[in-house]
Image: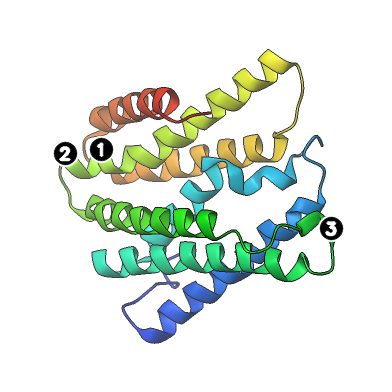
Amino acid sequence: MENIKLRHTLKSYSIVFLVGIFIGCICRLSDYCSIDSLWGFSSIQTLLGFWIITNTIIVLLSTSNKCAGISSFLYMFGMTLSFYGLQAILGMFIPLFSGGFRKSLFILFTLLSILCAIAAFVLYYWNKDNVLSSLLYSLPVGALVAEIIAIFYNILQHNTFTFLFQLIMDIVGTLVFGIVFFKRVKYKKIYIFGIVLSALIFYFIFPW
């Protein structure tokens, strides 16, 4: 990651936006997969883990607060635009994607893109060597832990594996970010406490 950086330039922002469009198309086309399948590919974009992991990577690659915020917004907006735009286009030929352009959902997720941008702007402050940075580093890890617990609970409650891909992705993301951030933070006890606290908050607040 040291050689790959997002910068406050038109070229960098254009690349991020195009990546968002590409990912949005992939997520839309994943609807071809059965929702009841073992891997649950059609539900990749419906859970928090995918968004947390990709936006955390954006913050890590950014070179400033402004760059992190703008890049996060362009990524999320590009994804939203292609996700609902592709549905409208494919819906003219394929019944699976019928329903036209869902304007209300497009507006909703565009607003959520702004919230992601604000979160990314704030998270970039984890580069400061203080107590706050240790807490900020703990937030994405705690959120991933919360989703892992929710998926496990869903498996136990319904006795069915339908989100295996998301579960594996969340576990890998938790381990990678958890270890990398643990090595970075100065106040490790605060970091661990932040993970536990944020996991509880995300678990009980988010409508799983």
Circles 2 and 1, Cβ within 8 Å, touching? The answer is yes
Numbered disc total: 3
List x then y, in percent, for residue 46: 59, 43
Which residue is depicted at the point 22% across and 40% down?
186
Q: Front-most of 194 and 150?
A: 150
Amino acid on which disc 1 is placed: Leu
Amino acid on which disc 2 is placed: Val
Mark 1, residue position = 135
List x then y, in percent, for residue 73: 40, 64
134 is higher (above) or lower (below) than 23: above
Circles 3 and 1, Cβ within 8 Å, touching? The answer is no
- Quote the CA–CA distance across marks 2 and 1: 7 Å
Q: Front-most of 186 and 198?
A: 198
Q: Front-most of 103 and 81?
A: 103
State which quadrant residue 172 falls in.
Answer: top right
Amino acid on which disc 3 is placed: Pro
Residue 95's disc is 3
Mark 2, residue position = 131
Question: Element type at marker 2?
Answer: helix
Which residue is depicted at the point 75% across and 59% down?
29
